[in-house]
């Protein structure tokens, strides 16, 4: 397989004209402490890649069935491979967060006006993938001004991101779990230019809780019976 791009937890690879995400056992964090929102590799854990792929397969198949356009085509769990559509990212990559509870960075920024755990109405925001600048928030106007995306693409991404977030929340509720927030990535299809949900949909993308207790990302598949 030809490596197209090396990431912290996944590589983008190509074989016989097909594109794949190769899930690795590396995990992000700081100073050796695992943190799914970290901007550097903290170490590795055997089986981490397979766990992320299992959960991604589960959610992507349900998201595709719901009519949302994604890059997901299929998964080979034994080889940690996810077959995908050939896509490009917006700029150097965007992360779109939808929040149902006020926790984490939302509290750090807006704690003067809210309290921990306050209900939020699918509040959504976009950050730039930029490790050196700690993934700064950016507005719609900023994205358009910097020619990262168009106004129509922004509106579509926010609309579809809320739709997918609410779908994942509903699915988790069916398993007795509560979703506090979730992060997705979006891109453009290389041929059609369509906006697609890309990357992965795993425990590392979200804060999920069971009876008020945070579920560690690699434990999510067990709660889903995968």
Image: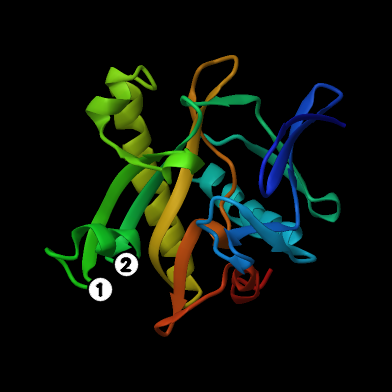
Which is more toward the observer, 99 or 146? Answer: 146
Q: Which residue is mark 2?
A: 103
- Image height of 133 relative to 143, above or below: below
x and y percentages locating residue 15 in the rendered image: 85, 28
Q: For the residues marked 1 and 2, what is the alpha-carbon distance in whole angstroms? A: 6 Å
Pointers 1 and 2 in contact (C-beta within 8 Å): yes
Which is more toward the observer, 121 or 8? Answer: 8
- Image height of 65 relative to 34, above or below: above
Helix or strand or loop: what does disc 2 sit on? loop
Which is more toward the observer, 75 or 44? Answer: 44
Who's the residue at 70% across and 45% down the image? Answer: 10
Q: Quadrant of residue 211?
A: bottom left
Q: Which residue is mark 1?
A: 116
The residue lying furthest to the top in this view is: 191
Q: Is residue 110 left or right of residue 179?
A: left
Q: Is residue 164 left or right of residue 187?
A: left
x and y percentages locating residue 55 in the rendered image: 63, 59
């Amino acid at each position: 397989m030809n490596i197209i791009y090396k990431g912290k937890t996944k590589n983008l690879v190509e074989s016989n004209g097909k594109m794949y995400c190769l899930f690795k056992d590396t995990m992000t964090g700081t100073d050796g402490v695992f943190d799914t929102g970290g901007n550097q590799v903290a170490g590795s854990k055997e089986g981490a890649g397979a766990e992320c792929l299992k959960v991604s397969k589960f959610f992507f198949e349900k998201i595709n069935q719901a009519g949302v356009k994604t890059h997901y085509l299929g998964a080979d769990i034994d080889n940690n491979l996810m077959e995908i559509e050939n896509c490009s990212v917006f700029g150097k990559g965007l992360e779109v967060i939808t929040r149902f509870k006020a926790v984490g960075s939302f509290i750090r920024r807006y704690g003067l006006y809210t309290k921990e755990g306050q209900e939020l109405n699918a509040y959504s925001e976009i950050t730039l993938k930029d490790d050196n600048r700690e993934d700064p928030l950016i507005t719609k106007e900023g994205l358009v001004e910097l020619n990262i995306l168009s106004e129509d693409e922004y509106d579509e991404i926010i609309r579809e991101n809320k739709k997918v977030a609410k779908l994942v929340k509903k699915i988790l509720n069916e398993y007795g779990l509560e979703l506090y927030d979730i992060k997705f990535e979006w891109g453009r299809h290389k041929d059609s230019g369509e906006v697609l949900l890309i990357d992965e949909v795993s425990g590392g993308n979200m804060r999920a809780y069971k009876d008020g207790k945070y579920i560690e990302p690699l434990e999510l598949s067990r709660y889903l019976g995968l």
